[in-house]
Amino acid sequence: MSVRAPVSGLDTLHPHAPVQVEGGEARIGGSAWKLAAYVFLENRLAVAGLVVVVVMFLFCFAGPLVWRVDLVHTDIANLTQPPGSGHPLGTDIVGKDVLGQLMVGGQTSLEIGITAAILATTFGVLWGAIAGFAGGWLDGLMMRIVDSLLAIPTLFLLLVLAAMFVTSVPMLIVIVALVAWLVPARLIRGETLSLRTREYVDAVRVMGGSGARIVLRHIIPNTIGTIMVNATFQVADAILLVAALSYLGLGVPPPATNWGDMLSDGVAYTYAGYWWLIYPAGIAIVVTVVAFNLIGDAMRDAFEVRLQKR
Amino acid sequence: MSQQQLADIKERAAGTGPLLEVRDLVKHFPVRGGLLQRAVAWVKAVDGVTFDIKRGETLGLVGESGSGKSTVARTILRLIPPTSGEVLLEGKSVFKASPSQMKKLRRDMQIIFQDPYGSLNPRMSVGEIIGEGLLVHGVGSPREREATVDRLLEVVGLRGQHRGRFPHEFSGGQRQRIGIARALALTPKIVIADEPVSALDVSIQSQILNLLSDLQRDFNLTYLFVAHNMAVVEQVSDRIAVMYLGKIVEVGPAEDVCKDPKHPYAKALISAVPVADPDVRRERVVLKGDIPSPINPPSGCHFRTRCPIATDRCAVEEPLLRPVGKDRVAACHYA
């Protein structure tokens, strides 16, 4: 995969002078990573997405250091206070500060989302690359397993799994990853089928390189665009999935919370007019998911991955 | 043991025998069809090919697209499994080698590819690409490998400081030089060059051809040079083997074959090479039609459907390679 950026951009990024050699002039340029970063940074929406994600991380992980409130004990004197002095986003039905909960709940949502995405992508990529490279019956077997699991409706599977086990953060990560690895497995297997016939793979065979070397050094690095794009979308999907599960009552047990739990707790009081119980968490979910999707889209362009349905 | 076998063994012991022997090499690809994906037909890409390559020589293997010449190259290297036949490198069987024996044999036989773009991993630096073979075989320390890579870059006309750069920063000709450096890294005895200049501009072609012949002299290399361009093959080869539809139809010293081809197909190929002299008038043999399908090749002589001198005998009796002069063989009843 080659990434080409406008020449003017190249000049500023790579200022080294061209070198004269017998075989002609060596063209200037950098690693494919630098070129991809250049294309990415040209996309304003993507940069906006990146800023939102960084701000959201700071808000959730550094925020509680500044905004110190008691999120463990109930405060009967201050139930469901509207936003105002002392509680910028009001208090919930047991009197806890909504702003503080939004930060701590965000930690859980982001942790689950990112860890599940990394886990699912790593496993899915290895599975797909091995199946595609091996070919034959092993490929058939491995991909039929993926197909069978894909045939099970996700929400149904999640409900059953969540009902069978006591939900905790590690449990939620595993459950989400268990569903999510199937998509990268199929994507990478497809790319591997084409990459394994490349001449540079033949060159490794001729020099006596092992199958593991071909998969790890030659095939997977050339799918890095697909991997990065897919992983980004996986984070967004995982955050949504956990929110959906929590909304259905299968979130993390209190006093821990996540954005989905907050929505779930607050939705019963919508008719009472307690909008501050659902808007902050709802907006946080939407903003974060949109930001990750914008980043994913821009990375797809940056890596010139062919447009494929995810 | 026959006298011939005894002589072969003596030759090998003395290191004077052929470096590479290809014996009756056959490669048929299945054409799958139907519900069960069974083989319904066979593409006879290589249909019984035999030749030797001597130490230090360049054997040019020519033929048009679909003649099976690239399949011969890839089968010799076991990039694709053979259907039958045998390949011996210094008398050692390539096809019967165990995985560990094969890994050792692979150091002695390397390949240069046609496409300078598809043959270099875009995610690896030039140093990693060239040094990979050394790494695979555990040659030297990381520092020694780096020094070897630098030296190889200089040898192929690039610079040591290009080690950290990536393939997309180089032109087609430069990339082909990198591919050549990669092939040389393991100090092979034979290099199979599969159309090494076909994808390059004409001005770059001669640079690469000169580089290849310089390297042959400096590193005592033996080449199997696969190409469809007779002019290129004539320039680099000591001997030429002409392939048509999975079979070799003529073999001989390059000069003799080019001056006086015996097989009608070789004649047609040679007559198609342009001559830079407006006064030279040559008999121009123009072939009619396309190469027949290798799934269902013509009976008898494979070339008879396009041959200007074919007779009834050619449809019935397959011509075998027979001597037609000093060190020359051709497969034609009328050669």
Image (cartoon, coloured by chain):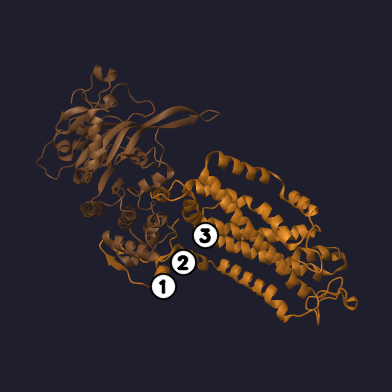
Picture residue at 23% right of the left edge, 27% below the top:
B331
**Dot 2 amino acid type:** Lys
Q: Both on one chain, marks 2 and 3? A: yes
Q: Position of residue A112 (x, y in %)?
A: 69, 63
> Dot 1 surroundings within 10 Å: few (below 14), some, or many (20 or more)?
few
For the residue labelled by badge 3, is the local secondary structure a helix, a strand or a loop? helix
**Subunit that carries the residue with mark 2:** A
Which one is earlier in the sequence, the residue at label 1 or at label 2? Answer: 1
Q: The orange chain is which one?
A: A
The Cα atoms of the two marked residues, 2 and 3, are separated by: 14 Å
Front label number (2 vs 3): 2
Q: Both on one chain, marks 1 and 2? A: yes
**Subunit that carries the residue with mark 3:** A
Name the disc covering residue A301, or none. Answer: 3
The Cα atoms of the two marked residues, 1 and 2, are separated by: 12 Å
Q: In this view, does B201 lie to the left or right of A123?
A: left
**Dot 1 amino acid type:** Thr
Quarter of the view holding residue A103: bottom right
Q: Chain B is drawn in which colour?
A: brown
